Image: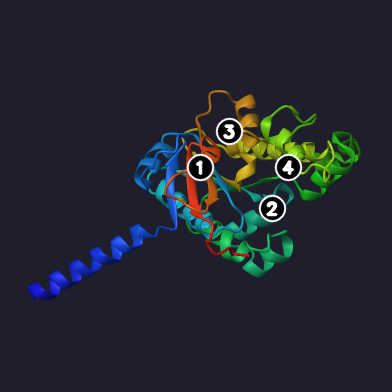
């Protein structure tokens, strides 16, 4: 019996060692120091809003979102919200959460992302099973497209009902914010001055509906593309502009060829950085 126990313990230690030798991701703080998941979770729980910036097709991003959500729910009451659901689809999302329509009915009545079933359904179903409010925070995409073509002035033509799905007009916009300036640099020759404005209406709208659904005393967990909260920019800028006293913590995902050390360019992009091996298989 002792031999069996010793063999089992040795085998387990060998597997653990092999896993540590070839990790799929490493957690870092803003300064690039490695941190444990438990340390990160402790900090997240001390805030009002957790912004999780994902890489949309990265499985580690989606797994971490679900694990963070489950572990936060175990210790605090939470509210959930996501970029992946547009505000005019809130009624359909609510009906699904309440069990009044099926998955098929939800799919046919809401504009679900192509990776919904693999990457976001687990979050939505967790909310459904635990009776958690889930906010559809994003602006309907057609309005962002309108701004991309015609600037904020394009919204002058929409109805009062349509304006209910967007942050109050006029949209707050600072073209000097690093994220918006970088968009023009990264897409030089392929974008217009209106493209950052389209990004801004998404950021402003997500911030607006986060605050609309936020309940003091509860932890609001928001899921969005990393660029929307990277460098405490985007959505975070709008949140702080409206509610300066809110305690907000950010998490982001980056990919590197070598993950034993965080690259300088990835430091300070968030309070916590999930650094994933760039060879990680994508979800689409």
Residue 11 visible to an observer of this rendering:
yes
Could you tell me which secondary element the residue under label 3 belongs to? helix
Label disc, if present, on residue 232 of the rendered structure: 3
Give the CA separation, mark 1 to mark 3: 18 Å
Give the CA separation, mark 1 to mark 4: 19 Å
Tell me residue 278's x, y (percent): 54, 57
- Give residue 198's quadrant in the image: top right
Q: Which mark sits nearer the N-terminus, 1 or 2? A: 2
Q: Which mark sits nearer the N-terminus, 2 or 4? A: 2
Residue holding disc 1: 263
- Give the residue at x 64% y 55%: 93
Residue lying at the far left in this picture: please name it. Answer: 2
Tell me whether circle 1 and circle 4 mark residues in contact (CB < 8 Å): no
Label disc, if present, on residue 91 of the rendered structure: 2
Q: Which mark sits nearer the N-terminus, 2 or 3? A: 2
In the picture, measured across the screen, residue 110 lies left or right of residue 1, that is right
Could you tell me which secondary element the residue under label 1 belongs to? loop
Q: How many marks?
A: 4
User: Badge 2 local density, few (<14 within 10 Å), some, or many (20+)?
Assistant: some
Give the CA separation, mark 1 to mark 2: 43 Å
Tell me whether circle 1 and circle 3 mark residues in contact (CB < 8 Å): no
Residue holding disc 4: 186
Tell me residue 225's x, y (percent): 62, 47
Tell me residue 112's x, y (percent): 69, 60
């Amino acid at each position: 019996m002792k031999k069996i126990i010793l063999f089992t313990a040795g085998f387990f230690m060998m597997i653990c060692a092999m896993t540590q030798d070839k990790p799929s991701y490493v957690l870092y703080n803003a300064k690039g120091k490695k941190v444990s998941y438990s340390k990160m979770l402790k900090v997240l729980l001390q805030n009002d809003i957790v912004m999780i910036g994902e890489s949309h097709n990265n499985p580690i991003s989606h797994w971490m979102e679900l694990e963070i959500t489950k572990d936060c729910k175990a210790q605090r009451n939470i509210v959930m919200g996501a970029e992946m659901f547009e505000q005019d689809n809130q009624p359909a999302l609510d009906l699904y959460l309440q069990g009044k329509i099926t998955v098929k009915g939800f799919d046919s009545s809401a504009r679900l992302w192509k990776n919904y079933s693999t990457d976001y359904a687990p979050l939505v179903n967790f909310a459904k099973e635990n009776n958690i409010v889930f906010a559809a925070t994003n602006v309907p995409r057609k309005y962002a497209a309108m701004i991309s073509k015609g600037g904020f002035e394009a919204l002058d033509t929409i109805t009062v009902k349509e304006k209910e799905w967007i942050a109050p007009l006029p949209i707050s916009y600072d073209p000097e914010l690093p994220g918006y300036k970088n968009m023009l640099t990264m897409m030089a020759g392929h974008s217009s001055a209106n493209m950052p404005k389209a990004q801004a209406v998404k950021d402003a709208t997500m911030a607006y509906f986060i605050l609309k659904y936020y309940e003091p005393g509860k932890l609001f967990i928001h899921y969005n593309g990393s660029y929307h909260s990277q460098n405490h920019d985007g959505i975070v800028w709008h949140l702080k502009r409206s509610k300066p006293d809110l305690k907000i913590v950010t998490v982001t995902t980056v990919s590197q060829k070598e993950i034993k050390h965080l690259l300088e360019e990835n430091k300070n992009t968030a309070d916590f950085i999930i650094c994933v091996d760039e060879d990680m298989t994508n979800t689409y």
